[in-house]
Image (cartoon, rainbow, N blue to C red):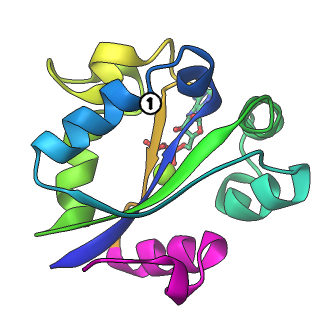
Amino acid sequence: MNRTFSIIKPDATKRNITGAINKIIEENNLVIIAQKRIKLSKDIAEGFYAIHKDKSFFNDLIEYMTSGPVIVQVLEGENAVEKYRGIMGATNPENAEDGTIRKLFALNIQENSVHGSDSDTNSKIEINYFFDENEIINN
Ligand code: ADP
Ligand code: MG
């Protein structure tokens, strides 16, 4: 068992499709062991996406991620990081495989409905960025 970090992004909360997204996550045997609905501040969003601070899309990304509520959550399951990346699909929904969350729901390469950690190292950093260990309940 391992853990990954997930965000349901503002385009999805705005369209009231958080349940539809989490249905797919749960159908794939990932268990939501922590969850909260929050609004990201500019500082928190910039810290979270610091790795992209030199990219051309950074300012737009921060504006978008702070434009409405998000759901931050911790998922647990076998190969959680890799499995959830597979379920999410490619960053650009035009390249995402059929049945993936981004193929089904993403509006475009920026408003792509979900975030998922890309490695076990980053999943730990990202989970710790939003959750205390006592907020994570897996039994
Ligand atoms: P992923 O979320 O698939 O790990 P990245 O880490 O590369 O993708 O990018 C982080 C987020 O930044 C993406 O999910 C998307 O919201 C946004 N993004 C990435 N590339 C672009 C782009 N070329 N134009 C606009 N937004 C982008
Ligand atoms: Mg990424």
Residue 111 figure quarter: top right
Residue 94 seen from this side: no
Which residue position is annotated with label 1? 18
Question: Which three-letter amino acid code belongs to the residue tagged 1?
Answer: Thr
The answer to if 137 sits in the magenta stretch is: yes
Q: Please report the residue visible at 63 percent of the width from the left and 41 percent of the height from the top.
A: 70
* Residue 138 vertical placement versus 23 (above, below): below
- Structural crowding at the residue carrying mark 1, measured as other residues with C-alpha within 10 Å and reported as few (<14), some (14–19) or many (≥20): some
Residue 18 figure quarter: top left
Q: Please report the residue visible at 71 percent of the width from the left and 43 percent of the height from the top.
A: 55
Query: What predominant SS class does the magenta segment belong to?
Result: helix
Secondary element under disc 1, as helix, strand or loop, is: helix
* Spot occupied by residue 34 in the image (x, y as percentages of width and height): 44, 66
The answer to if 129 sits in the magenta stretch is: yes
Quadrant (top left/top right/bottom left/bottom right) for the C terminus: bottom left
- Which residues fall within the magenta stretch? 120-139
* Spot occupied by residue 122 in the image (x, y as percentages of width and height): 46, 73
Q: Please report the residue visible at 29 percent of the width from the left and 28 percent of the height from the top.
A: 101
Q: Please report the residue visible at 32 percent of the width from the left and 38 percent of the height from the top.
A: 22
Return the residue nearer the eye: 91 or 104: 104
Q: Is residue 57 left or right of residue 22?
A: right
Quadrant (top left/top right/bottom left/bottom right) for the N terminus: bottom left
* Residue 104 vertical placement versus 82 (above, below): above
* Spot occupied by residue 27 in the image (x, y as percentages of width and height): 11, 41
Residue 20 seen from this side: yes
